[in-house]
């Protein structure tokens, strides 16, 4: 029987492994979306594919890899992976998220026995499809969203499956970055595998496996005790998306009902909108990630993020909903719906546990992906950026200005990186003062950034939420709402910025300026 | 006599080495309210012990926490920040990442400069260093007037792409200085590197420290002169080199890790002298453990760090710091999980055994229960500890909740602490591509040598080096450091033909700056390039063999880059295009290292045995300890500033100059 001290030490070592994998990955990756904006995660799993430890980069990917790993193995590798194999998957209907999130998994064997898996998920800048960057709210079926990898081998027995790499190279818009980023992901897997083997070597495989099981059991006990301490009444909350980008200005409802019963958390999403004809639908695994974030934020750090926690969180939603779409509904811009779902979960849990509640953060998530040929090099480029907005005020402190909120945690692209690597000039990057909600503690201010195109022409997509004042970040305890967000364009030669519809495609010419404006956060108290 | 004075939060350590090799040590209490006085006190104590008057001090080096403390305690100057129009909020927006991902109640750190002290001027340099919008000098004048009215005490100027073309920054800085009479820091001088946010924070921090640190160095120089010290003052920088007082005061942001850097330099030199140029160092004090990696006798550097949540883009010794030390508090939560640190009982109330009112169990209390520490002899018997209070705290806080005996609980506390320190050491070695099993471990700090062998066991290390004075290695490191200046210049170019001439032009400019800093001293210049694969964001710093830059020299650097990339990340792509981002130059003036002579051990006192965790250990006093041809554990060697434990299965050897080497038998 493993002693509790050794078990704690093994648990901490597993977290260090996930963090070290993450460092290897972002420092050697190529796409700004990974290396600057940190839209990726690494994880360590047990031999059953249960998550043991997770790098803390972007919560939107919480728990996701576990469902992809388990479903991918069950579907295509019922006898397991062999040493040296790497499985590649990105299928939204096979436990995955949207197609640009490429997930890779490698088994770790000690003396021939499977002891676990290492995994990496990263948002690639483009995996082909109808539009640059693959994402669009106006995609109407999954087949427009680029390459689908249904849990197939990227590396077999240590050898790259060359036809697959060639296929990827031929089908994505920035193959240099995509293949380089896949290399970085493989490097992370290798590093994690080495570390896991060293751990097995240090403690003995049997002790390591006992420690792993003990970690999940202990986490499970912590999670149940935590949930049992919560009031056993049901709470409900709702929020709305501006629209789905296909049918303009028709809001979509997102609703949750949360109830604790016998130390288990039940989350019912059935009050939410039916699935959309566009790309805003949320794959079932991403709906889980949104709920997991809210749960984690209200549990506190004494409950580690692993399968021991998530096995006590039960989501319910009938198939065919926005939050559990039917194949082959498009899902590429699911993130804005994920953020709104998180917002509603945080609102509901704040009502259940008022002592831990804060005002709402913005979930506007202004972003664009635009392709343009750089006149300096003659090469096509795909530029993307994600802007923050205001955080929610707390009882004892104002909201943070200019943050990416909740399940998202993407860094801003440095202006100097943007101008060096892309044919754009960043004219300004500013706080929008006064955009945070009023209150005893003010909500955090939103921000704006102006991008002027220096290439002859650019084409791509953009999207944003919270352009409708009715759906701005809510205040709490009498605090006021945050200001709205917007995406605007100023055509070359004009002085006027015109607001664009919240989601769409855009063509720009040299000298045109795109303005992204992230919404403010809610205020607290009066 | 050559003198090093390291001023920490609690103690001031002074070391003097006379020309005949005799070493003198003085440990005095720091005087946070009047730091100069503590410095002078320490010098006086050293003078007393050595019998050498102040005018016999030939060299004086100083490690200081004055910069760090000012930042942590918010005692820095009010800075006015002047930026490119449209970018005054960069200092607050930062990366837009949250400091606390899952804690919605915990705010981000406040911005370094409040919005009403952030000013903009029209100007723009483009990504090729070209002028896009000329500097609007009238607007600079207007901003200068506004700054005068604002009550700001220092100015930071940060323009976009100034690392490629500093002309606008230089002109604006000159105008603002003339206009306001305030000291002006410009980013192209402090941190001429890509990425506007870390460059902004580094520049703003430097500006905010200038008045305070400048005043400190001036006052100290005057006060020392008054006591008869004629040697010029040198200050230790985060990079591990020293600089003359006035020069160091002009770049105070480089002093942030002065103390820890001195400790690593001391450890690195001791290890190299003992024949181990490749080593890990662990410096365990009361609250934190600092860890570092030394390769080829040189502490490894990093080029990005942070202070109080703000990035600092300057070369600094890559010191990892975790909350683990003698004062670290051990707690058991409701689910039976034992944690040790990062919370610390500090020096006041300190561990329960201090009897100053501390009720929580600490690592020191655990060591008293285990027998590692003899409560009667702590700090040479000057501050006896209360063993009953230590046992009571361990029993109540750890043993009771875990259902263990006090001894087993104490052992568990030490095990968790050891695992934490080993994990920090793994981060700076394994995660950087270095196998700790091929390294020696240098154990320093008051609490380092008692944990050294256990940490070595965790990492598979066979050899632990313990310096003669483990508790004051930083003060010794001050005497072993060279004068050093680190220069950098942004130079963003894909490696290809027709690069060498442009590169050499930049190098020539950097060399001129280096010669100015060296001020006539004959220094050695070492060149480095930050290289990455085109499209990557994180560079690796690799040596360039010198000037003039040539295709062949660049090619050699690029080959070294592929090797370094493979070492760091496990893969390399030799046929992929590479890109240079920054040119670096390190200018070094070697200083004579004092040689500490061999000591004659004092006559051996009575030895006795003491059980540690139930195993009888022979106990020796350091001053009278004779290693002879090696002694096998289990033994304990006690000295005023530390306790060395040689466990069963380990043998201790003499490595000269008072250094002990513990080896697995």
Image (spheres, coloured by chain):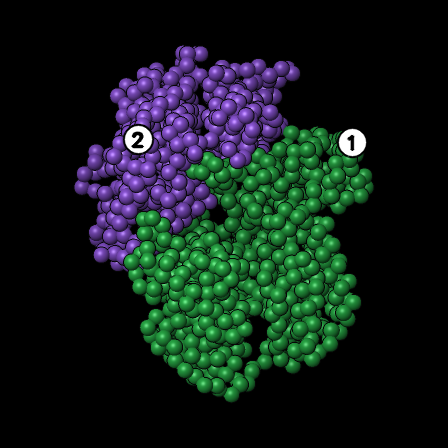
Chain colours: A purple, B green
Describe the element under mark 2 as helix, strand or loop. loop
Q: Is residue B585 above or below residue A45?
A: below
Considering the image in quadrants, where does the C terminus of chain A appear?
A: top right
Which residue lies under the disc numbered 1? Answer: B142
Residue A442's place in the image compared with A88, above or below, is: above
Viewer-side label of 1, 2:
2
Q: Tell me the residue that label 2 is attached to.
A: A232
Q: Secondary structure at mark 1?
A: helix
Measured along the vertical axis of the image, is residue A112 above or below residue A496? below
The quarter holding residue B454 reads bottom left
Q: Identify which residue is drawn at 73% across, 61% down.
A: B220
Looking at the picture, how far across and down is residue B8, in whole percent? Answer: 60, 61
Q: Position of residue B377 (x, y in %)?
A: 49, 74
Q: Tell me the crowding category of disc 2: few under 14, some 14 to 19, or many 20 or more residues within 10 angstroms, Cα based.
A: some
Residue B55: quadrant of the picture = bottom right
For label 1, the crowd category at 10 Å Cα-Cα, with few meaning under 14, some 14 to 19 and many 20 or more, is: some
Q: What residue sits 66% from the left and 69% below the top?
A: B42
Query: Does residue A32 appear in the picture of this structure?
Result: no
Q: Are marks 1 and 2 in contact (CB under 8 Å)?
A: no
Quadrant of the image occupied by residue A444: top right
- In this rendering, would B629 be left or right of A7? right
Looking at the image, is B507 positioned above or below residue A311?
below
- Picture coordinates of residue B625, whole percent (x, y): 48, 82
């Amino acid at each position: 029987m493993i002693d509790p001290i050794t078990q704690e030490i093994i648990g901490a070592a597993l977290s260090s492994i996930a963090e070290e994998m993450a460092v290897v990955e972002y420092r050697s990756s190529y796409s700004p979306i990974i290396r600057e904006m940190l839209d990726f995660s690494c994880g360590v799993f047990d031999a059953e594919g249960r998550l043991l430890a997770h790098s803390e980069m972007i919560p939107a990917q919480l728990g996701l890899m576990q469902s992809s790993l388990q479903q991918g193995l069950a579907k295509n590798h019922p006898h397991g992976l062999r040493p040296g194999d790497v499985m590649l998957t990105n299928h939204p209907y096979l436990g995955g998220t949207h197609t640009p999130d490429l997930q890779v998994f490698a088994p770790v064997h000690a003396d021939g026995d499977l002891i676990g898996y290492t995994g990496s998920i990263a948002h690639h800048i483009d995996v082909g499809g109808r539009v640059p960057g693959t994402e669009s709210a106006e995609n109407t079926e999954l087949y427009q969203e680029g390459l689908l990898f249904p849990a197939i081998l990227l590396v077999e027995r240590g050898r790259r499956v060359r036809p697959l790499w060639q296929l990827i190279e031929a089908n994505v818009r920035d193959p240099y970055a995509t293949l380089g980023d896949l290399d970085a992901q493989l490097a992370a897997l290798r590093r994690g595998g080495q570390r896991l083997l060293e751990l097995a070597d240090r403690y003995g495989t049997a002790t390591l496996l006992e420690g792993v099981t003990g970690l999940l059991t202990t986490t499970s006990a912590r999670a149940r005790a935590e949930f049992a301490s919560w009031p056993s009444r049901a709470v409900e909350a709702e929020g709305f998306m501006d629209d789905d980008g296909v049918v303009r200005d028709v809001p979509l409802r997102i609703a949750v009902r949360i109830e604790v019963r016998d130390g288990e958390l039940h989350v019912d999403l059935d009050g939410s909108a039916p699935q959309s004809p566009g790309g805003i639908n949320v794959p079932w695994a991403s709906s889980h990630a949104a709920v997991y974030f809210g749960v984690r934020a209200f549990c506190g750090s004494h409950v580690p993020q692993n399968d021991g926690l998530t096995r006590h969180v039960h989501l319910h939603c009938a198939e065919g909903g926005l939050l559990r779409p039917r194949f082959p509904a498009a899902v590429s811009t699911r993130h804005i719906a994920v953020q709104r779902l998180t917002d509603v979960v945080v609102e509901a849990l704040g009502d259940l546990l008022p002592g831990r509640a804060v005002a709402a953060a913005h979930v506007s998530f202004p972003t664009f992906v635009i392709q343009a040929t750089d006149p300096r090099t003659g090469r096509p480029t795909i530029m993307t950026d994600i802007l923050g907005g205001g955080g929610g005020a707390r009882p004892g402190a104002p909201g943070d200005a200019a943050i990416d909120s909740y399940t998202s945690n993407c860094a801003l692209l440095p202006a100097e990186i943007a101008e060096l690597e892309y044919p754009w000039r960043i004219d300004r990057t500013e706080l929008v003062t006064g955009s945070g909600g009023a209150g005893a503690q003010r909500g955090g201010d939103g921000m704006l950034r102006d991008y002027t195109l220096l290439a002859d022409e650019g084409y791509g997509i953009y999207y944003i939420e919270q352009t409708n004042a009715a759906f701005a970040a809510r205040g709490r305890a009498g605090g006021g709402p945050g200001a709205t967000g917007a995406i605007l364009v100023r055509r070359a030669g004009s002085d006027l910025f015109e607001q664009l519809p919240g989601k769409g495609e855009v063509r720009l010419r040299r000298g045109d300026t795109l303005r992204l404006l992230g919404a403010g956060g809610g205020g607290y108290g009066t | 006599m050559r003198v090093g004075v390291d001023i920490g939060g609690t103690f001031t350590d002074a070391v003097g080495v006379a020309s005949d090799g005799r070493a003198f040590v003085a440990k005095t209490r720091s005087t946070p309210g009047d730091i100069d006085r503590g410095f002078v006190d320490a010098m006086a104590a050293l003078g007393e012990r050595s019998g050498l008057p102040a005018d016999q001090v030939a060299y004086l080096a100083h490690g200081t926490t004055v910069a760090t403390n000012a930042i942590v305690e918010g005692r820095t100057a009010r800075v006015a920040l002047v930026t490119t129009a449209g970018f005054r909020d960069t200092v607050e927006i930062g990366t837009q990442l949250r400091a606390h991902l899952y804690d919605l109640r915990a705010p981000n750190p406040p911005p370094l400069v409040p919005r009403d002290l952030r000013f903009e001027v029209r100007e723009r340099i483009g990504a090729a260093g070209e002028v896009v919008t000329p500097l609007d000098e009238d607007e600079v004048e207007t901003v200068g007037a506004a700054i005068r009215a604002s009550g700001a005490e220092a100015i930071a100027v940060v323009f976009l792409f100034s690392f490629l073309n500093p002309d606008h920054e230089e002109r604006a800085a000159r105008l603002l200085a003339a206009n306001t009479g305030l000291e002006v820091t410009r980013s192209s001088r402090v941190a001429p590197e890509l990425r506007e946010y870390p460059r902004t924070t580094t520049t703003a921090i430097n500006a905010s420290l200038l008045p305070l640190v400048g005043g400190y160095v001036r006052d100290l120089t005057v006060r020392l002169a008054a006591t008869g010290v004629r040697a010029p003052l040198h200050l230790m920088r985060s990079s591990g080199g020293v600089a003359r007082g006035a020069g160091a005061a002009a770049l105070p942001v480089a002093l942030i890790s002065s103390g820890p850097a001195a400790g690593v330099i001391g450890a690195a030199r001791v290890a190299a002298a003992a024949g181990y140029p490749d080593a890990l160092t662990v410096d365990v004090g009361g609250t934190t453990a600092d860890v570092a990696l030394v390769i080829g006798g040189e502490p490894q550097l990093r080029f990005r760090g942070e202070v109080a949540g703000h990035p600092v883009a300057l070369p600094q010794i890559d010191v990892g710091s975790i909350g683990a030390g003698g004062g670290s508090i051990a707690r058991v939560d409701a689910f039976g999980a034992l944690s040790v640190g990062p919370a610390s009982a500090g020096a006041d109330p300190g561990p329960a055994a201090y009897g100053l009112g501390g009720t929580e169990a600490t690592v020191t209390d655990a060591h008293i229960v285990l027998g590692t520490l003899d409560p009667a002899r702590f700090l040479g018997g000057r501050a006896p500890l209360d063993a009953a209070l230590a046992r009571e705290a361990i029993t109540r806080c750890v043993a009771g909740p875990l259902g263990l005996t006090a001894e087993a609980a104490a052992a568990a506390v030490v095990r968790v602490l050891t695992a934490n320190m080993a994990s920090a050491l793994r981060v700076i070695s394994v995660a950087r591509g270095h196998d700790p099993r091929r390294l020696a471990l240098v154990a320093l700090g008051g609490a380092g040598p008692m944990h050294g062998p256990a940490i070595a066991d965790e990492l598979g290390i066979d050899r632990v080096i313990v310096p003669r004075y483990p508790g004051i290695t930083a003060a010794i490191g001050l005497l072993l450091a060279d004068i050093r200046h680190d220069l950098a210049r942004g130079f963003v170019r894909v490696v290809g033909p027709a690069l060498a001439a442009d590169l050499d032009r930049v190098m020539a400019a950097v060399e001129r700056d280096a010669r100015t800093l060296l001020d006539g001293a004959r220094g050695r210049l070492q060149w480095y390039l930050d290289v990455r694969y085109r499209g990557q964001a994180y560079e690796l710093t690799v040596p360039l063999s010198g000037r003039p830059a040539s295709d062949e020299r660049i090619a050699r650097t690029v080959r070294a880059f592929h090797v370094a990339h493979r070492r760091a990340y496990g893969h390399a792509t030799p046929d992929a295009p590479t890109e240079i981002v920054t040119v670096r130059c390190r200018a070094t003036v070697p200083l004579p290292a004092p040689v500490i002579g061999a000591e004659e051990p004092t006559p051996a006192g009575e030895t006795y045995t003491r059980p540690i965790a139930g195993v009888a250990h022979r106990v020796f006093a350091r001053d009278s300890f004779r290693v002879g041809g090696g002694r096998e554990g289990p033994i304990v060697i006690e000295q005023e500033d530390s306790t060395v434990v040689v466990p069963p299965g380990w043998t201790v050897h003499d490595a000269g100059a008072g250094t002990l080497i513990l080896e697995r038998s």
